[in-house]
Image (spheres, rainbow, N blue to C red):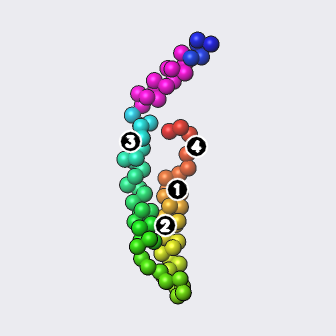
Amino acid sequence: MDLVHRQLDEDQEEIDDDPTSSFWFQFKSVGPKLVPFFKTLGMYFVIFIPADRPSWFATLIKCLPVASLALFVVLHGISMSKQ
């Protein structure tokens, strides 16, 4: 049992020593790529779209945040690993 705990401690030390596993490193590398999503999300909430007069422009504004986030996922890839 002591061997298992020692191995877990060594694995945790390797993760702690890896600078790419930190939150800030991940935020700095991925954050700028999410700027188009946040800009389109801001446009969605700032631009007034009357509900009684739907238009293609309103449809585009409502779909842009989802489309930009989907593009981010496609370009960045989906990773199920710890890294």
Q: Earlier in the sequence, mark 4 or mark 3?
A: 3
Magenta includes 10?
Answer: yes
Residue 14 magenta-drawn? yes
Q: Is residue 34 above or below residue 13?
A: below
* Dominant secondary structure, magenta: helix
Determine whether the residue tagged by mark 4 lies in a helix, strand or loop. Answer: loop
Residue where numbered disc 1 is placed: 73
Q: Are marks 4 and 2 in contact (CB under 8 Å)?
A: no
Count neighbours of disc 3 (C-alpha within 10 A) and say few if under 14, some if 14 to 19, many if 20 or more. Answer: few
Over which residues does the magenta segment extend?
A: 6-18
Real-space Cα distance between discs 2 and 1?
Answer: 12 Å
Q: Indicate which disc, 2 or 1, sits on the residue closer to the N terminus.
A: 2
Q: Secondary structure at mark 2?
A: helix
As shown in the figure, which amino acid type bears the numbered disc 1? Answer: Val
Q: Which labelled disc corresponds to residue 65? A: 2
Q: Which residue is mark 3?
A: 25
- The kind of residue on which mark 3 rests is Phe
Instruction: Give the CA distance from mark 4 to mark 3.
Output: 18 Å
Helix, strand or loop at label 3? It is helix
Q: Residue 81, image x and y in percent?
A: 56, 39
Whether residues under marks 3 and 2 lie with C-beta atoms below 8 angstroms apart, the answer is no
CB atoms at circles 4 and 1 under 8 Å apart?
no
The residue shown at (37%, 47%) is 28
Mark 4 vs mark 1: which is more N-terminal?
Answer: 1
Q: Secondary structure at mark 1?
A: helix
Q: Observer-nearest residue: 53 or 68?
A: 53
